[in-house]
Amino acid sequence: MVNNLKRNFVEAMTVQEVKNYLSALEPRAVIFLDVDDTLITPISKVFRAHSPHRTLIDELKKERDQITNFEKILSRWRLQRQVQLVSEDWLCFINEFKAQFPLYALTKMESGPLGDILSMEEWRYAELSSKGMKFTPIYGENEKEILLSSPSMTYEATFYRGIFSTGSFNKSEIVRAYIQKENPSQVVLVDDRLGQLQDVSEECSRRSIPFIGIHFKGHELLPGIPDPSLAEFQKNHLLNNHEWLEDEEALLCSEFNLT
């Protein structure tokens, strides 16, 4: 079955389904796991799969040049939000597969300092480690490395203790750098966004590397839909006060008009 998936995508709602698709990986394959909404997701119902406010942070990023103190606001959200595993099964999956293959997190995220965060790489490592997730710790012979940098790019692409951060680059550019250095027999990407899968698929196709893209939709199984007015309150409070309020706290503040 896997041989027929070299340039196609499959859907998976559970980690067990992901595992089934990878039951016959080639030797020297490499596995990349997206982070946000694949491995972890915010606890707040604002960010549930069927929430109209799910892309709140993405929308703010598009307006970053018009938002005063945007980097501080974004860093405060990252530091203050609470997250949960999309599936507890990821822990066993990671430990099982990293014993057989290089297995890395691949996150579309800024690198270096951001607002109140001194190192995005160290912050993300700590966040994932706190949930019990650790990945193949080195890339080549290093546990920390700058992969790509450019004067025209704001953030460098980096590797830190099992986690590739794209910075201002694309995931396909990270995969290209990996292929050039390690020459894997096969590339796997598990991601909740089809655009990311397409991006990496095209890069692998250009380099004649077999690719398995798994569109993971496990976050759709998490219950909860936000109250629209409460979600708007949370957004405005974040922008005006540089503070993220989780759902229960936001409800209490909104009821007493504590902005």
Image (cartoon, rainbow, N blue to C red):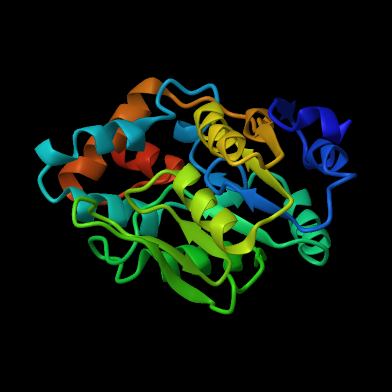
Relative to 252, is 194 above or below? above
Instruction: Quadrant for residue 137, please give it.
Output: bottom right
Compared with residue 20, is residue 32 higher up or lower down, i.e. above or below? below
Quarter of the image with the N terminus in it? top right
Depth check: give the residue in front, 44 or 220: 220
Q: Is residue 19 left or right of residue 117?
A: right
Residue 150's place in the image compared with 116, above or below, is above
Residue 256 in sight in this render? no
Q: Is residue 92 left or right of residue 45?
A: right
Residue drawn where x is 65% and y is 67% of the image? 134
Q: Residue at x 54, y 38 (%)?
A: 203
**Residue found at x 25% / y 65%:** 116
Q: Quadrant of residue 157?
A: bottom left
Viewer-proximal residue among 193 and 148: 148
Q: Position of residue 238 (x, y in %)?
A: 25, 44
Q: Is residue 45 left or right of residue 105?
A: left
